[in-house]
Image (tube, helix red, strand yellow):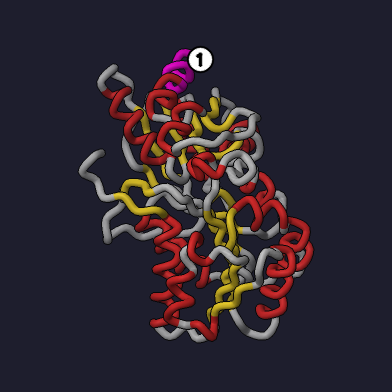
């Protein structure tokens, strides 16, 4: 993967906001909480300073402002770190945006363990679980630059609240320019009928590497990119369960309430097969270089492959 181009999805977010404004989306406004340089909304601010609002370190208030703007015909993209956008501001997101089903897009950056040196207080591994509980909330967790750019565009096109999850770490570009993202539709990345690996975010790249490891052992793994966590692609999950008989989920999030939980819910209700979850195991993060922390928390191709072998063994 050394020669593969790598881009952080937060960069994709900032670039796409600027592009959308340049294309004539005059109703698009951006709000940030004193983190524009880090969330990359600073790109938008530089080009459109009169449409970028710094709300300061007051994330709950920022969500209320965005809610109000949306009722006046604007489409606000509200930005902060995932810990603050989903965590600190949860009540305002639920009551001021989710309950009235307002057209607000939440761009949450710096999600997961890959935040790195900022440590446990900023490594939000609970945001997907929180957002999944809000009725009508769409949740998008893109795997690379291409998918992230298209996810931002897709979020703008639908009416209603959207939670977009972006990362700090530069990750490999997996998709070409011919890729077309669609909300609610998973993408089959590899073919295989021995086990299905359903991954999201930066773990999609790790899942593809795991599939190569397994291929050398005679295990054919079907890798599925599940960029939309809600509404989840139930048909894809059911098909994978029927055709492979074993599923592994992989996410840079707690194994409680995230992709693993969402997939397990579908499988339990339809085609019960073994489901093993790769993610953060009910623990807080720690400070350190992202590339060292990810394998430390089991967020690696090697651990996915190990878990897939166990899933295959459990098949009846």
Q: Is residue 175 above or below residue 277?
A: below
Does residue 164 appear left or right of residue 205 in this picture?
A: right
In the structure shown, which secondary structural element does the residue marked by tag 1 occupy? helix
* Quadrant location, the N terminus: top left
Q: Is residue 106 above or below residue 71?
A: above
User: Which residue is drawn at the image coordinates 56% and 57% (left, top)?
Assistant: 108
> Of 181 and 191, which appears nearest the observer?
181
User: Which residue is drawn at the image coordinates 48% and 20% (left, top)?
Assistant: 311
> Of 82 and 229, which appears nearest the observer?
82
Does residue 146 appear left or right of residue 253 in this picture?
A: left
- Counting the numbered discs, the total is 1
Q: Mostly what secondary structure, the magenta segment? A: helix
Kindly tell me whether residue 262 is visible in this rendering.
Answer: no
> Which percent across, then down, holds residue 190?
32, 38
User: Which residue is drawn at the image coordinates 29% and 17% (left, top)?
Assistant: 217
Kindly tell me whether residue 309 is visible in this rendering.
Answer: yes
User: Which residue is drawn at the image coordinates 69% and 48% (left, top)?
Assistant: 130
Specify few, some or many for label 1: CA neighbours under 10 Å numbering under 14, 14-19, or 20 or more.
some
> Which percent across, then down, holds residue 240?
46, 35
> Which percent across, then down, holds residue 245?
47, 25
Q: Residue furthest left?
A: 3
Q: Label 1: which residue?
A: 314
Q: Is residue 82 above or below residue 314?
A: below
> Of 103 and 171, which appears nearest the observer?
171
Does residue 310 appear left or right of residue 53 in this picture?
A: left
Identify the magenta region. 307-314
> Which percent across, then down, holds residue 25?
47, 83
Q: Decide whether residue 74 is among the magenta residues.
A: no
């Amino acid at each position: 993967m050394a020669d593969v181009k790598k881009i952080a999805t937060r960069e994709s977010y900032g670039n796409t906001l600027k592009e959308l404004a340049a294309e004539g989306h005059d109703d698009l406004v951006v709000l940030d909480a004193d983190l524009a340089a880090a969330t990359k909304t600073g790109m938008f601010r530089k080009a459109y300073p009169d449409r970028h609002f710094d709300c300061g370190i007051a994330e709950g208030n920022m969500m209320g402002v965005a809610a109000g703007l949306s009722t006046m015909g604007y489409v606000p993209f509200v930005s902060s770190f995932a810990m603050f956008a989903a965590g600190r501001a949860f009540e305002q997101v639920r009551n001021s945006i989710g309950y009235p089903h307002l057209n607000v897009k939440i761009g949450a950056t710096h999600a997961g363990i890959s935040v790195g040196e900022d440590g446990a207080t900023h490594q939000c591994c609970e945001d997907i679980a929180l957002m999944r509980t809000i009725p009508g909330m769409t949740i998008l967790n893109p795997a690379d630059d291409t998918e992230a750019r298209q996810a931002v565009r897709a979020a703008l096109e639908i009416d209603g609240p959207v939670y977009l999850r972006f990362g700090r770490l530069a990750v490999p570009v997996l998709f070409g320019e011919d890729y077309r993202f669609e909300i609610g539709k998973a993408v089959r990345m590899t073919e295989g009928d021995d086990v299905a690996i359903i991954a999201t975010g930066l773990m999609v790249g790790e899942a593809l590497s795991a599939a190569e490891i397994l291929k050398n052992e005679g295990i054919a793994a079907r890798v599925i990119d599940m960029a939309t966590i809600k509404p989840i692609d139930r048909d894809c999950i059911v098909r994978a369960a029927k055709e492979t008989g074993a599923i592994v989920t992989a996410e840079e999030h707690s194994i409680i309430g995230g992709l693993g939980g969402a997939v397990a819910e579908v499988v339990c209700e339809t085609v019960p097969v073994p489901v093993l979850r790769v993610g953060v195991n009910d623990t807080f993060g720690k400070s350190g270089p992202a590339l060292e922390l990810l394998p430390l928390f089991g967020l690696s191709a090697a651990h996915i492959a190990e878990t897939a072998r166990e899933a295959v063994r459990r098949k009846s």
